[in-house]
Image (cartoon, grey):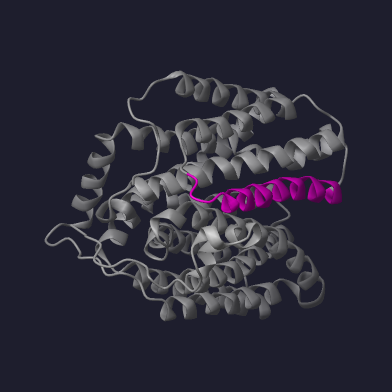
Amino acid sequence: MAAETTKPSNVTAGPTAELGPVAAMFRSLRYRDFAFFWTGNFLSNIGTWMQNLALGWLVLELTNSPFWLGLNGFLGTAPSLVFSLPGGAIADRLNRRTLMIITQTIMMLLALILAILTSFRIARIQEILIIGFLTGLASALNNPAYQAIVPDLVKPEDLTNAVALNSAQFNMSRTIGPTLAGLTLGSLGAAGCFYLNTVSFLPLIIALLAIRVPTHSASQGESVWGAMLDGVRYVGRNRVLLLLLSVPATLSLLGLPFVVLMPVFARDLVKVGPSGLGYLMAGAGFGAVASALTLASQAHLQPRRQFILGCAATFSLGLILLATVSSFWWSFLLLVVLGGTMVGTLSLTNSTLQATAPPEYRGRIMSMYNLAVIGISPVGSLQAGAVAEALGVRTALALGGGVCLAYFLVLLAMRPGARLAIRE
């Protein structure tokens, strides 16, 4: 099985203790390779969010149907439900940097094809759905390698900071990308957004070519299926890992789907239009970025069971309260809380899993994390929509938050025998 043979040593600054509070917040960027990786991902994610918004607009123009919008979103995330685990096995067998270069190049070419089809006005809904599915498939294979490569770029004591900074860049790009897409749509159309997304892949691909990743010895003679089952058996024997993975899985199924209900919540309950919805979602984005930067500023934070489950329980309580309000400002403040506690829960869980996982299993364990966060989300969206259709949006929000809160309080009351602390 894989065994780590070298450690990150590309630090360009002194010890954390010598840094000021702002410098300490961004201390993982002292590592040359992580700084390249972080910057490339940030620019690439801006392009991805631009394409997501423009693609939704294009689908709506072509079909004028919410159903096709939902189907396009489902096909873009459904591959994670099926291919996350094989992707983790592949990430543990192949060079993770090489795997990321391949998947990022495939997604860049798919964005280019979409841009060309749209430019010549020959894009049909069928081609869009196929491209969306193939992009989701490449992303499902890319994500475990993306998660597993981070501990190769920083020292163990800076891992929580690196994961938090990754979360910060993702949420900052989620704020910047749609804003730029709105401006680009008005001047260059959807094709312009797709071309810009194509270009945005280049910084990440160049960064991947430039960074130095520690070598790992690949497993010999074991099939991808066998490696995947071995990873599942390993997690099944580890109670701490099972409990950790159950936290994002529960949120993805019952809590995080609140996002798909926000248009109806904004229009029918808060009585605001599209611009009001944008401000509400900006509140969630603000909370997410603030939470990520706060985590990044905590030197040598060692996530424990109480930290993770406390964030998750606060998120659940916020969701229940959101179901009761009709005021714009109360909704905005609660969404700030939801965004912050969502990122807190996921970032702490992510960093704990990465630090706990042996290097030879890290890709497979992170593929299970991706399955819990991304793969389950299509099922969560379907259940949230069905409950809201039958019982109303308020009931759907309160029910999801209530079940989550009960589960996390039970976990908090348990004594798992070993605290959920990162491995030395």
- The image position of residue 415, as x and y in percent, is 38, 21
- The image position of residue 302, as x and y in percent, is 46, 43
Residue reaching furthest to the left? 221
Q: Is residue 199 left or right of residue 290?
A: left
Q: Does the magenta segment cover residue 278? A: yes
> Is residue 313 among what the camera can see?
yes
Q: Is residue 387 left or right of residue 187?
A: left
Q: Is residue 245 left or right of residue 385?
A: left
Q: Is residue 296 above or below residue 409?
A: below
Q: Is residue 383 above or below residue 148?
A: above
The residue under the point 25% across, 46% down is: 231
Callout count: 0
Q: Report the front residue among 358 and 419.
A: 419
Q: Does the magenta segment cover residue 329? A: no
The residue under the point 45% across, 73% down is: 33
Q: Is residue 276 above or below residue 4?
A: above
Q: Report the front residue among 384 and 330.
A: 330
Q: Report the front residue among 34 and 127.
A: 34
Q: Report the front residue among 223 and 315.
A: 315
Quadrant of the frame with the N terminus: bottom left
Q: Which image quadrant is residue 389 in?
A: top right
Q: Which residues are magenta?
A: 274-301
The residue under the point 79% across, 51% down is: 278
> Is residue 55 among what the camera can see?
no
Q: Is residue 405 left or right of residue 415?
A: right
Q: Which image quadrant is residue 388 in?
A: top right
- The image position of residue 277, as x and y in percent, is 80, 46
- The image position of residue 111, as x and y in percent, is 56, 73
The residue under the point 51% across, 38% down is: 379
The overriding secondary structure of the stretch rendered in magenta is: helix
